[in-house]
Amino acid sequence: MKNSQILVLFLIGAVLTVIGALFKITNERKDWTTFFLIIGMTFEAVAGIMLLLKLVKKNKNNTDSFLDS
């Protein structure tokens, strides 16, 4: 997976988390706030795991820089 795709996953998660936090602050419907927070943080966690796996895989080859892909 490319760096830009991982970044998009992380940004989608961040947006969903911010929306869930704003709904939580304004005391909106409780079921949607929890849904947005859980889905957003899941996106962020998956993006973080994919980034770590890519870093580990790149260090084994060590032929080019991480930012070159």
Image (cartoon, helix red, strand yellow):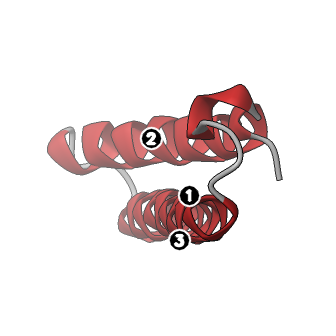
Of labels 1 and 2, earlier in sequence is 2
Circle 2 is placed at which residue position? 14
Mark 1 or 2: the one toward you: 1
Pointer 3 or 2: first along the chain: 2
Q: Nearer the viewer, mark 3 or mark 2?
A: 3
From what the image shows, is residue 44 above or below residue 45?
above
Name the image quarter holding residue 64: top right
Residue farthest along the front direction in this orientation? 63
Is mark 3 in CB contact (under 8 Å) with mark 2? Answer: no
Give SS at disc 2: helix
Q: Amino acid at mark 3?
A: Ile
The image shows residue 13, relative to residue 49, as above or below, that is above
Q: Quadrant of the C terminus?
A: top right
Q: Nearer the viewer, residue 43 or 61?
A: 61
Labels 1 & 2 near each other (Cβ < 8 A): no
Assess disc 2: are there few (<14), some (14-19) or many (≥20) residues with their C-alpha within 10 Å of its C-alpha. some
- Number of numbered callouts drawn: 3
Image point 28% across, 37% down: which residue? 22
- For residue 49, the mark is 3
| Helix, strand or loop status at disc 3 | helix
- Disc 1 and disc 3 in contact, CB within 8 angstroms: yes
The x, y position of residue 43, in whole percent, is 58, 60
Classed neighbour count for the residue bearing mark 3: other residues with Cα under 10 Å, few (<14), some (14–19), many (≥20): few
Residue occupying the point 50% across, 66% down: 52
Q: Position of residue 46 (x, y in %)?
A: 58, 68
- Vertical side of 15 occupied by 9: above or below: below
Q: Amino acid at mark 2?
A: Ala
Cα–Cα span, label 3 and label 2: 15 Å
The residue beneath circle 1 is 51
Instruction: Assign a secondary structure to mark 1.
Output: helix
Residue in front for this viewpoint, 37 or 11: 11
